[in-house]
Amino acid sequence: KNVQRRQAVTVLGATGSIGTSTLDVIARHPERYRIHALTAHRSREPLLALCLTHRPALAVLGDERDATWLRAHLAEAGVATEVESGPAALVAAAEASDVDVVMSAIVGAAGLLPTLAAVHAGKRVLLANKEALVMSGSLFMEAVAKSGAILLPIDSEHNAIYQCLPTEHRGGLARHGVTQLLLTASGGPFRGWSAEALEQVTPDQACAHPNWSMGRKISVDSATLMNKGLELIEACWLFDARPEQVQVVVHPQSVIHSMAAFSDGSVIAQLGNPDMRTPIAYGLGWPDRIDAGVAALDLFQVARLDFEIPDEVAFPCLRLAREAMAAGGTSPAVLNAANEVAVEAFLDGRLSFTGIADLVARVQDAEPFESVCDLEAVLEADARARRAATALLAGH
Ligand code: NAD
Ligand code: MG
């Protein structure tokens, strides 16, 4: 019998695609985990349902009106969950002293401060919120090193690479005989389309991903290949790689989740069905392996694996991201902020699909470059890039 203390988990972004998959895995292991806090932005009804099932000590919503509503409904149901609201409450949920594990699954820059709080508090941080790392790269990784936080990548590609690398892989890829990281990409719903054909695509077409079911923002990013660009930056920070050491490989079946190439000619890959519960269970269980509820990969059904070079003419976001990483400083934060504004405008019908890359490029060109990268500079670059993108949109 397992007499270990149960680990207390905070799920930031609990109502989202990653959040609900995380709770699905946790529910399979009641002897290992309990929920400390669940958070959501505006989804008060889904958060109520999750609170009734998982009975967290704390629930956090974006604004106080929704929190009042949730408090009343929980009281009515006789559930003793405390309810708070706002950004400071998110930080508190992440850094609370009785929390062991924080799942960072808020979408976008809103996840930065609570994720950094979890890092500073030395938690086991399961990182799905790639935007936080893209924005703050060096200071994020320095904080991890300083606090002793255990950072486990949940993005399927980075989780795959993490599994392929030696256990102790810090200090540069070359030291461990790694020559290249091979970041696989499904190519998204518009793989093979020309730049002209892409001009007319709608938000619903962009969100219909062939292999993965995800939130709308990352679905659009997958369609523009900005997701792969953000992941390239994410890989550089997580694995201490230079942009030219990361090769994007279009692999439409999404069965190889990524690979590492070594100096002796070996290429190590991690394979599995495209289901985020696998990397989530890896992060939760590490260094143990635990049941994720995911069926074993049936290679006879997969039958074949294809590989293609990404089309950076039709999908310029990948190049924009690589350039931002090479430029360094606040460039990735500017790229990310401009992209968030552009994707929101596209989803609202205010910007065309191809307008996303155009807007990001124009903001990148217009924004002054900052080489310092402390938190203040990052937040300032983020805010300025959002203002610049919004102004360019209004001028259209
Ligand atoms: P989602 O849109 O389904 O869920 C987002 C969650 O964040 C929700 O709980 C929402 O309430 C919360 N949220 C949104 N805005 C917020 C704000 N301003 N303040 C606080 N909370 C806020 O998104 P998702 O698909 O689950 O993705 C979450 C993160 O994980 C993203 O960074 C994404 O890039 C990353 N990721 C997702 C997948 C996937 O398969 N969905 C895979 C890899 C990485
Ligand atoms: Mg990914």
Image (cartoon, grey):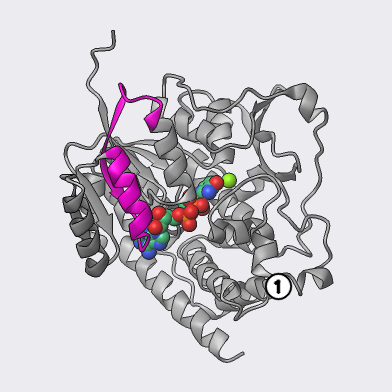
Residue 36 covered by magenta stretch: yes
Q: Amino acid at mark 1?
A: Thr
Q: Nearer the viewer, residue 229 or 325?
A: 229
- Measured as percent of width and height from the top left, residue 141 is found at 39, 45
Would residue 193 be seen by someone viewing this image from the given angle?
yes
Q: Position of residue 87 (x, y in %)?
A: 26, 62
| Number of numbered discs on residues | 1
The answer to which of 93 and 147 lies nearer the viewer is: 93
Q: Residues within 10 Å of mark 1 (few under 14, many from 20)?
A: many
Indicate whether 3 appears above or below 257: above
Depth order, front residue of 382/395? 395
Give the magenta part as a residue range.
27-54
Query: What is the quadrant of the N terminus in the image?
Result: top left
Q: Residue at x 71, y 65 (%)?
A: 316
Residue 70 at what x, y percent from top left? 24, 58
Residue 173 seen by the camera:
no
Front residue (pair 26, 170): 26
- Looking at the image, the residue that sits furthest to the bottom is 395
Locate residue 307, reporting x and y percent: 80, 40
Residue on which the image places disc 1: 354
Residue at x 19%, y 54% (from the top left corner):
83
Quadrant in which the C terminus is drawn: bottom right
- Mark 1: secondary structure: helix
Q: Is residue 245 magenta?
A: no
The residue drawn where x is 54% and y is 38% is: 276
Residue 201 appears left or right of 173: right
User: Considering only vertical position in the picture, is 145 above or below 381?
Assistant: above
Image point (23%, 42%), residue name: 121
* Residue 332 versus residue 100 in the image, above or below: below
